[in-house]
Image (cartoon, helix red, strand yellow):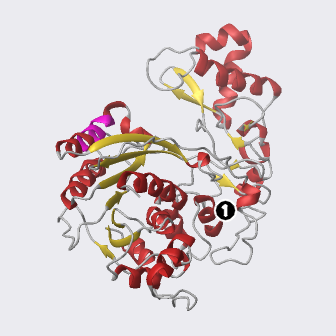
Amino acid sequence: MNCLRRKPNPDVQANGQDFVTALRSGILHRNRMWVELFMTRSDTPYQFVSLFSGCGGFDLGLVDAGFVPVQAYDSCADAICHYQRNVCSKAVQADLTEFMPQIDRTPDIVIAGPPCQGFSTAGKRDLADERNHLLPLAGRIAAHINPRVIVIENVTAAASGAHLKYWKEMEEHLRSKDYRTHTLKANAADIGLSQTRRRLLLFAWRTARDIDFQIHAKPSRRLDVTLSGVEKLPNHDPEPLAVDSRDYRIACRIGPGQKLSNVRGGSRSIHTWNIPEVFGKTTAAECQMLEFIMRVRRQERRRTFGDADPVSVARLKKQFKEQTTPLIQALLHKGYLRRVGTDLDLCHSFNGKYRRFQWDDKACTVDTRFGEAQLFLHPNEHRPFTVREAARIQGFPDDYVFDCTKRTAFRLIGNAVPPPMGRMVAGFARELLGR
């Protein structure tokens, strides 16, 4: 990967207030070399260190708000290379579990976005996931650097259930170092982005400031507005599904606002038995049994865990009488039902795949799999989203170039903190710092 630097804009003058004006107006956001020149001055604005920086989404938000990065750390080589290309060169590939960063000059703020995979409900939510310990580690490293303000970001599930112990460990350590703390819940849709992305932000500060941690909500942006004009931008390479593919045949049956789901009813869910050209033909009576099981498995619960239960043969006989056995045998043979012990459950019991978003609505959370058609579909084309479209929905600027494979780009984008969320954090941090 070639991490070439961009040339500074000659319109930005390297003196006095022009630097501050340029930084706050966003010019330096598009001319990263000036950020580095700015860092050498003695009259710089607030400076920050970034832990678990990823490719710099969080950091871009602070840069846009007038903060200057002095050092960033991440263990991913791809993330660091993109940070160096698109934010500034002060980024180091490092495993923060193996050393404690030493910063020459104490920054005003430390930000951190430790991995969320062990906490996220989109994954296994494994309490023993080794990455969970990186959350309290972020707090310990940040406190060691000793800034006046610390902000640590993670998914909302990091502070729920048994996983809460990691969040408490982090918060208690910061309080033991005389930091005051506040946990803020934020949704990307409330700050004007066209995605639902709920996150927790732990603010810790050692200043005399008391502020109102109130997010002044903005209307979420429609997808058609967010994705307007992407056609000639870098990293926009649409890949239509092959017309003879299984994915294409499924996509043709999924309308805007719909998804493939056997476990939900209503007009937004398309069931596998509604797509016979892919999953096989069913009779009207077989469809009735499948839809009955879809309802009963969630309504008539026998367990205290999970969100549904397999259905007993006795329950089906009560509903379908003498038709029960031949219907069950046919649906087992066709692959629509499966046995769970002595009970029966639906095959393809995922909550939703092939989600097709609507132009006049917002997307769900942009994650690392956002480029997979089996999970997410473009609003009116039979294809997945492009890297540039995912970056737009995340709030990355159009001049942020992903010089890597598409798979890597989607991973970097999905793991990032949206830059606009970084700008929101910078606003609170500025209040806590007193300017």
User: What residue is at 72 percent from the left and 55 percent from the top?
Assistant: 223
Q: Is residue 227 above or below residue 379?
A: below
Taking the image as drawn, is residue 402 in sight?
Answer: no
Q: Residue 405: x and y, percent?
A: 53, 75
The residue segment tinted magenta is 163-170
Q: Name the residue under label 1.
A: 385
- The picture quadrant where one finds residue 168 is top left
Q: Residue 285: x and y, percent?
A: 79, 23
Amino acid at the residue labelled 1: Phe
The residue closer to the viewer here, 331 or 244, is 244
User: What residue is at 68 percent from the left and 36 percent from the top?
Assistant: 334
- Whether residue 258 sits left or right of residue 84 in the image: it is right
- Magenta: main secondary structure equals helix
The residue closer to the viewer here, 423 or 42, is 42
Q: Residue 69: x and y, percent?
A: 37, 71
Whether 107 is among the magenta residues is no
The residue tagged with tag 1: helix, strand or loop?
loop
